Image (cartoon, rainbow, N blue to C red):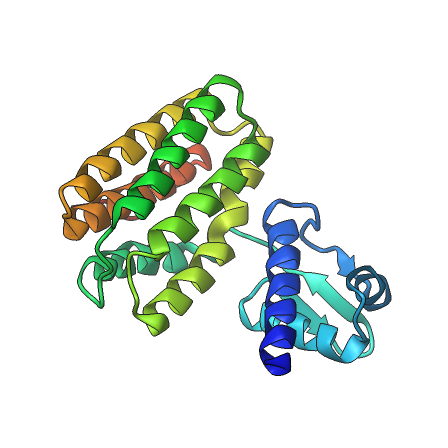
Amino acid sequence: MAETGVRDRHDAIHHEIRQRICLLDYPPGEKLSEAELAAEFGISRTPLRRVLARLEDEGLVQSQHGVGTFVTNADLGELEQVYRLRVELVELTGRLDPVPPDAAYLARFDDLIGQSHRIMASGTPRAFTQFDMLVFQTLLDLTANEPLRAVQERLYYQTKRIWLTSAMAAQLDLSDEFRIFHHELEAIRLALQAGDLDAVAHIQRAHISMSFNRLLNRSGRPEATRAT
């Protein structure tokens, strides 16, 4: 039981630092202070280094021997292949160990749609990014395939900073982005109500593909992938 509690604590710290990186609280290139983080979370440096090693394995930080641990860059060109892989993998959630939505899950999703309404009215890039993370984790619960969940989570958080960076640089039409996402959520809700998880996966695939292509267009690069 004690071991489980420690693991949960470390998972929570990992989640918090990952959130800060994805929300650009720790921007690319920033050096993370082990001493400050250990003091903040009330742990020694040894378990903190395990958390940082996990983040490094996920591509979010990089450790330089004798120098420190730094937040990595999130470059659209470097992560183009990651986006392509996300497009293909998401369809598997409707096929590998699918978890049919029950009434509680549908209620959770209805709450997300309510939050989406509020974001369309007065959202910020940061609020939208936080909301997108919540939607991602909710949709991830539609598969019980742990290896698939782990890979999708890893790839999602590798690319998450790209959208927020572009939005903060005024390269995206936020009202259009919010509106498109809201309509996609409504389409997913209809598919969930029908119990059609393949349709849910196809909608997610289209969302990732079109979102990536909008980023490419804003950066002046040709479109690299399209949903089919």
Residue 30 image position (x, y, % from top left): 75, 55
In the rendered image, the vertical position of residue 171 relative to residue 11, given as above or below? above
Residue 120 image position (x, y, % from top left): 44, 22
Residue 93 image position (x, y, % from top left): 25, 59
Between 225 and 108, which is closer to the camera in this rendering? Answer: 108
Question: Is residue 142 left or right of 116 when viewed as pictured?
Answer: left
Could one spot residue 53 in this view of the protein? no
In the rendered image, the vertical position of residue 109 relative to residue 14, given as above or below? above
In the rendered image, the vertical position of residue 226 relative to residue 98, given as above or below? above
Residue 2 image position (x, y, % from top left): 64, 80
Taking the spot 70% from the left edge, 46% from the top edge, the residue there is 25
> Which quadrant of the figure has residue 181?
top left
Question: Is residue 28 left or right of 111 when viewed as pictured?
Answer: right
Taking the spot 18% from the left edge, 40% from the top edge, the residue there is 193
Question: Is residue 86 left or right of 155 when viewed as pictured?
Answer: left
Between 122 and 111, which is closer to the camera in this rendering? Answer: 111
Q: Quadrant of the N terminus?
A: bottom right
Between 129 and 107, which is closer to the camera in this rendering? Answer: 107
Could one spot residue 23 in this view of the protein? yes
Between 201 and 211, which is closer to the camera in this rendering? Answer: 201
Taking the spot 28% from the left edge, 62% from the top edge, the residue there is 143
Q: How many dots with numbers? A: 0
Question: Is residue 168 left or right of 113 when viewed as pictured?
Answer: right
